[in-house]
Amino acid sequence: MALPVVAIVGRPNVGKSTLFNQIAGDRISIVEDTPGVTRDRIYTRADWLTHEFRLIDTGGIDMRDEPFMTQITQQAEIAIDEADVIIFVVSAKEGVTEADEHIAKILYRSKKPVILAVNKVDNQALRADIYEFYALGFGEPHPISGTHRTGVGDLLDQVVADFPAESDPEDQDAIRFSIIGRPNVGKSSIVNALLGEERVIVSDVSGTTRDAIDTKFVSPEGDEFVMVDTAGIRKRGKVYESTEKYSVMRAMRAIDDSNVVLMVLTAEEGIREQDKHVAGYAHEAGRGVIIVVNKWDTIEKDTHTMNEFEAHIREEFQYLSYAPIVFVSAKTKQRLNKLPDLIKRVDENHKRRIPSAVLNEVIMDALAMNPTPTKNGKRLRVYYATQVAIQPPTFVVFVNDPELMHFSYERFLENQIRKAFDFEGTPIHVIKRARK
């Protein structure tokens, strides 16, 4: 299931980034006493109790006509549009301002759950003054101090209570895959070519697709799929997609809701930084990944072109060494018939379980081939391994001291597991743990 999304919004310099860092557990956002420092939406995964969610920090919403303020307002409105729950941050030290009232009007229109956080409540006198914030119309204000973390736990209790109810996705037996990539790489064209019909509007204008569209289809072999065409951002009011990065959050939500991800590049334009950013998220989320190079019909080729392009992809996406690469043309339908079988195979690998006895034979053979290293005169001892999870396949290796297992030896064991079993298209996780 896609993770709930929580957006932190408010005018500049009320402590949004400080609160973001407290919830995220890390200093991700830049914190500075200057209004407008956070110009872009910043997002991360966070959790509270048993609930995991995606957290967005935003630039402050301001009515002043200053450099960046229009863009900051647009990005904050995009975050509001994407959110399931909104934390509206105000400052106890300054009371209700005209800007707070302006933001409140924007939030009324969103019709999303809004939780009012009164920040900078650093003493009892300020706590007594929070009741004026009832005038903003969002119910009981939550007094917090982002700097000292007081009240943040109670705030998060209310946040998770307002999450949408989880529901089991339809077609549980169907393989869910998302199609991600920069605007105008041909994602919708691939959807239409796979379906054999004009199910999704196709246009040469970047960002034509506004919403994520789930499309069901059955392959000629009878396999059921649910296809998620990741979209650009909905154009609501004065929200404009002036840069490509606005589509990243929507892609993340689709990735979270997928078993397999098709990362679409274009043969004409090659690889860009945003491609690495979104593909990296799919890898970190533990999804199966297939790299699809579209518009292969549009470039001049010789006998070396495909191998050279593949080598370039492997160099730029070293962390996706397990991902198969397929060169297609949505326009001519070249090799598109290979995608359903490839998606099915990657999904099967993503769910693959290895019996412990068979796994340990491979581990013992690996130890014989490459004996464990020593550190400060102490040798690493590997006792046994077992698979503890799927999607992605996750293995725990029990050792005498996890500190003795260098990253390179961990990677060696992962490579030996890959050589022994078919895990094409899926990341695998190897966790080292001390034997008790």
Image (cartoon, rainbow, N blue to C red):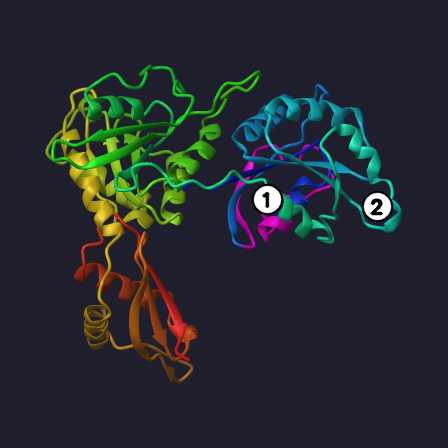
Q: Which image quarter is the C terminus in?
A: bottom left
Please give the name of the residue rendered at 16% of the width and 32% of the height, measured from the top-left corner. Answer: 219
Q: Secondary structure at mark 1?
A: helix
First-in-chain label (2 vs 1): 2
Which residue is disc 2 drawn over? 127
Up the image or down, 425 lies above or below 379; here it is above
Image-quadrant location for residue 228: top left
- 223 to the left or right of 256: left
Image-quadrant location for residue 406: bottom left
Residue 167 image point, x, y percent: 42, 40
Q: Secondary structure at mark 2?
A: helix
Do tag 2 and tag 1 residues touch (Cβ < 8 Å)? Answer: no
Is residue 30 in the magenta section? yes
Please give the name of the residue rendered at 60% of the width and 29% of the height, measured from the top-left corner. Answer: 76
- 375 to the left or right of 33: left
Mark 2 is surrounded, within 10 Å at the Cα level, by few (under 14), some (14 to 19) or many (20 or more) other residues, namely some
Q: Amino acid at mark 2?
A: Arg
Which residue is disc 1 drawn over? 161
Residue 144 image point, x, y percent: 74, 47
In space, the residues marked 2 and 1 are separated at their CA atoms by 24 Å
User: What predominant SS class does the magenta segment belong to?
Assistant: loop
